[in-house]
Image: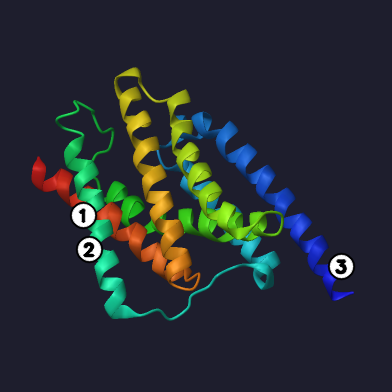
Amino acid sequence: METQKNSKKHLVISAFLLIFFFLRYYFDDRLAMMNPYSSYYVEIFILSLFYIIYKDALFLGFRVFEKAQFFFFMVLFFSLGAMFSIAATPLQISIPFNFKSQETIFFLLIVAPILEELIFRSFLFLTLRQYFPTKYVYFTTAVVFSLAHFNAYRFIPTEYSHFVFYQTFYTFILGLGLSYILYKFNKSLMAVILCHFFFNLGFYLAQVFGA
């Protein structure tokens, strides 16, 4: 009986995720016309609702992990973020973010790491793991994470189109790294959120001090 109940719940979660991704990315261009960060507001609302209804099914995983060992990965992800940020200049890739904006800083350093990890390394990971071997799910979540960033190509100004391809590439590398962190640190969501934060922090600081 419990197995049947869990199976039904996973089906509901799967359907919810499909609807979420369809609505989130189909209407992304319309949301962007309202406000560059409107899509994040929609995600906050939907994921909050999802948590209230299905909190017992979520793969939150805020587990304790080895802090000394994690310090190495913190520095590694910070360095990767800085490297990709710096590399955009010689590649003549324009970055469409206003790094002096407090809103940009807030979403880049706080909202994005938490929301995106809840979506990709929690909800999506949990759902796909019900149907596929875990080793394939680590890779798949990295691919979907990367393609989600490519979605901006549909509505971003032409002068920034090269950045979308560049961002799709480095978010795929980031996604693989975060999948490894999820595996390395006993599926700790806190660990991947922190690594995502330090990657974005490195990207941001390289832009600020590079400019």
As helix, strand or loop, the secondary structure at mark 3 comes to helix
Q: Return the residue nearer the eye: 71 or 9.
A: 71
Q: In this view, does 37 lie to the left or right of 95?
A: right
The x and y percentages for residue 83 are 20, 46
As helix, strand or loop, the secondary structure at mark 2 comes to helix
Residue projecting furthest to the top? 158
Mark 1 vs 3, N-terminal side:
3
The x and y percentages for residue 115 are 47, 56
- Disc 1 marks a residue whose amino acid type is Ser
Q: Circle 3 sits on which residue?
A: 4
- Disc 2 marks a residue whose amino acid type is Val
Q: Circle 1 sits on which residue?
A: 79
Q: Circle 2 sits on which residue?
A: 75
Spatial CA distance of label 3 from label 2 is 44 Å
Q: Considering only vertical position in the picture, is 21 above or below 52?
A: above
As helix, strand or loop, the secondary structure at mark 1 comes to helix
Q: Are marks 3 and 2 in contact (CB under 8 Å)?
A: no
